[in-house]
Image (tube, rainbow, N blue to C red):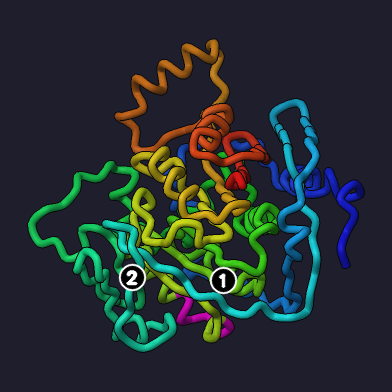
Amino acid sequence: MALSLTARKLVPCLSLQASLARHSESAHPVLPFVPDFSRQLRFRWPATFQKHRGQTRHSFSQEAASARRGVVQAVVAGEVIDIQAESVVTQVETEAAQKPKTIDLACPICYGPIERRGPEGFSRAAVDASRFECPRCKRSFPGKQGYADLTVLEGAQEYADFLPPGTQIFRNPLVSFVYERGWRQGFAQAGFPGVDQEFVMAQRYLEPAAGGVLLDVSCGSGLFTRRFASSGKYSAVIGSDFSESMLVQTRDFIRQDRTLDDANLALVRADVGRLPFETGSIDGVHAGAALHCWPSPSSAVAEISRVLRPGGVFVASTFLAPRAPIPSPLARQARQTFGPNSAYRQWKEDELRDLARACGLVDFCCTRNRQFIILSVRKAD
């Protein structure tokens, strides 16, 4: 049943506000790379995964997905929440399953279409038996360990890029192993609401992408990739990451969850600054707790804008800088001076707004709690 736009105007952001307020903690914020393993791991070994088995499928009519939204603003004073919403969407529910869509892979060098040689599907066996070839560049990319490696330097023997610590650390198999076993839970000290609640928030913001292809970029261990695939809301879900060990961890978790056996789910090794997908081929992009790790956020967000279809949505969560007792221009200068020596970037909301606008993304909407922020923007038509 289609819902009235006027009746639903404030629901998405305000319901997120209420949910986040219930999960707000007063603990002193810490950086994401200093998890308290002595406290966290004791109760979380081995890891458990809450499976989502809901049967209801959601989709959007073309009219609802493209509806232009009136400007609404809701600001909650104080430290708990600061929301500025510029848009909302209407929702139409349907019981019919969406017909799977093809995943339009592209060469990371020339962005030309990739030709696949091998069996169909994205099971580990099918991917490992496939090669992905660019007829224009004459480059060939193999499938290995259950994912397609579509990075520029795949197969390079001597040359390697120098990667910043915030990127390199997640290629460590130990970090990949502990990510869901204590590391990610430590984000609560900075205001993150917990994975389940963050997933609910992301799903609300991703409603315009329902029924389409969803890219979970910098997917890590597949924490959200698996949930998106289990939700049944998308015709295809792609989990991509630069870390080989994170993709192996994602593959292992997927293999343990038999409800995902028939999911239209693909794993791709990719550089977020050089995404191997055709222009305008993705309906929604999600990046959970990743923006602060990217070597060049401007290149990455520009790439996300490129692969999004007109009207497609980008949803991301990341860390905000603590509120400083000095004027904003001085704080900005300090971050620019010392930022290159830091493993992770801490954002100001205005910086995120400006970056999105510069990359052709509009209708900025966000939810905040201390250092946590989740934001949504839309590719301009």
Residue 254 in the magenta stretch? The answer is yes
Label 2: state its secondary structure: loop
* Residue 130 visible in image: yes
Between disc 1 and disc 2, whose residue precedes?
1
Q: Is residue 364 left or right of residue 5?
A: left
| Residues at marks 1 and 2, CA–CA distance in whole angstroms | 35 Å
Residue drawn where x is 69% and y is 42% of the image: 24
* Residue 41 visible in image: no
Question: From the viewer's perspective, is residue 174 above or below residue 75?
Answer: below
Labels 1 and 2 touching (C-beta < 8 A)? no
Q: Quadrant of the N terminus?
A: bottom right
Closer to the observer: label 1 or label 2? 2
Residue 214, given in percent of the width and then of the height, sits at 55, 63
Q: Nearer the viewer, residue 187 or 286?
A: 286
- Crowding at mark 2 (Cα within 10 Å: few <14, some 14-19, many 20+): many
Q: Is residue 361 left or right of residue 253?
A: right
Residue 97 in the magenta stretch? The answer is no
Q: Nearer the viewer, residue 49 or 240?
A: 240
Look at label 1 and name its amino acid. Answer: Phe
Look at label 2 and name its amino acid. Answer: Ile
Residue 301, given in percent of the width and then of the height, sits at 46, 44
Magenta residues?
253-259
Q: State whether the magenta stretch is mostly helix, strand or loop.
A: helix
- Total of numbered circles in the picture? 2
Residue drawn where x is 34% and y is 41% of the image: 295
Residue 317, given in percent of the width and then of the height, sits at 56, 46
Residue drawn where x is 61% and y is 74% of the image: 230
Q: Is residue 4 left or right of residue 286?
A: right
Point out the residue furthest to the left here.
158
Report the disc number at residue 49: 1
Residue drawn where x is 44% and y is 40% of the image: 292
Report the disc number at residue 114: 2
